[in-house]
Image (cartoon, helix red, strand yellow):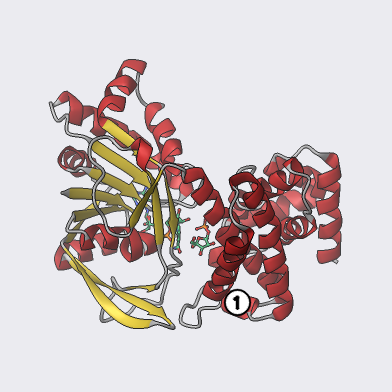
Amino acid sequence: MKALHFGAGNIGRGFIGKLLADAGIHVTFADINETVINLLKKQQSYSVKIVGDGANHIEIVNNVDGLNSVNQDELLAKIQQVDLITTAIGAGVLKIIAKPLAQGLLARIQQGNTQPLNIIACENMVRGTTNLKEHIFSHLSEQEQQLISQYVGFVDSAVDRIVPPVEANAEDPLQVTVEEFSEWIVDETQFKGDIPNIPGMEQTDNLMAFIERKLFTLNTGHAVTAYLGKLAGYQFVKQSIDDENIKQQVKAVMQESGSVLIKRYHFAPAAHAAYIEKILKRFANPYLQDDVDRVGREPLRKLSYNDRLIKPLRGTLEYQLPHTMICKAVAAALCYTNANDPQAVELQQTLATEGVMATLAKYTGLEDQAILTEIAQAYAVLNN
Ligand SMILES: NC(=O)C1=CN([C@@H]2O[C@H](COP(=O)(O)OP(=O)(O)OC[C@H]3O[C@@H](n4cnc5c(N)ncnc54)[C@H](O)[C@@H]3O)[C@@H](O)[C@H]2O)C=CC1
Ligand SMILES: O=P(O)(O)OC[C@H]1O[C@](O)(CO)[C@@H](O)[C@@H]1O
């Protein structure tokens, strides 16, 4: 079996590419980073360092190569040959790869390859593959869309492993460092053909519960740890979560979002409480140096209507549940500054020119004046 994976970054090499290669699948990484691609082509392998209380060892990933995705001919040819396409490139980049994917999928079928092909986007977003499919279909006629729908499965997934960037190791520049924990859950109802047997890829017919559980617990808590940590002057997530005051606030936010998840998906409260505790421990992993600016990156995306802060907040309104701590978390996100992050710069400019209520309405999509006011009040306290 052969796979094409877009994005030879932290999750690409440290998680998805590794699982695929470990399952005996030949993986071609497509990336725009020429240095990484040339190294992958040359070495056809790389190393993954696994760190945590129960582990500190290196595993070698073999049976891989690289392709510069700027080279359209090579990319289209590869799409003809593979059985699986995965991505870990960033939610905002899916639309960029949609056009060559549309061309490649169409050419593949028109040239007579009607073998099933499955596509799985592994991004931090709700139903990322469905989003990618919509971008791909925007480049195709209705007839072409129907043709592709016959042979190509668009499989949504939830992906969970903390893989921060590490300082380049001069002796082993492709090495990535990962935590022990990993969870990749795919929607088994969306595959075309047989579901590949990939140890570490779990199947479910109830994906939304798992996506929301992960995104609105780990990612919600992580973002709040980053934003409160930044406000307190910390550089790393670990420093922030080791601050007991911040830890209690992060936990309270996860409990508020958790009460929505418990109500919506009927998770057992005790099991969900244990899930929160485990995540707090993962944030405090002493072997990972995770910068608050990485975890807080792109605040406008993180403040959007369906993302990790606003969707759980909307859930508390839907079920009339407490939301004081999530409002404070949103306020902390509004305070996020980073001159190197264009979204953080835009956020601060908008706050300065349009004020907090208009800024909130613009980026969160919330219309409820009472909740906007509550967040604005929390912001006034934090920004004092
Ligand atoms: N790092 C983590 O711990 C986790 C990240 N994620 C998600 O995984 C995705 C990737 O994150 P990371 O691996 O951390 O990012 P990364 O920045 O390490 O890797 C992204 C890779 O995509 C490449 N890329 C960018 N534009 C491209 C294009 N047009 N064509 C081909 N390649 C392109 C970049 O050169 C880079 O190598 C994101 O959606 C993130 O939210 C999900 C779970 C964990
Ligand atoms: O990659 P994003 O969506 O910017 O958010 C960073 C988040 O992703 C992760 O890297 C992995 O889920 C978390 O560490 C963090 O919560």
Q: Is residue 377 left or right of residue 346?
A: right
Relative vertical location of residue 214 with respect to residue 105 in this rendering, above or below: below
**From what the image shows, is residue 257 above or below residue 239?**
above
**Which residue matches tag 1?**
235
Q: Residue at x 40, y 82 (%)?
A: 54
Rendered residue at 40%/64% (across/down): 182
Q: Secondary structure at mark 1?
A: loop
Rendered-image quarter of ligand 1: bottom left
Q: Quadrant of residue 52?
A: bottom left
210 sits left or right of 63 in the view:
right
| Residue 347 visible somewhere in the drawing | yes
Tell me what residue is drawn at x 46 percent, y 37 percent: 131
- Taking the image as shown, residue 186 lies to the left or right of residue 251, namely left
Give the image location of residue 65, x and y in percent. 18, 58
Q: In front: 312, or 168?
A: 312
Say which quarter of the image contains residue 293.
Answer: bottom right
Q: Amino acid at mark 1?
A: Gln
Where does the image place residue 297, in percent across and percent down from the top left? 56, 60
Residue 135 percent coordinates (x, y): 42, 33
Count of all numbered marks drawn on residues in the image: 1
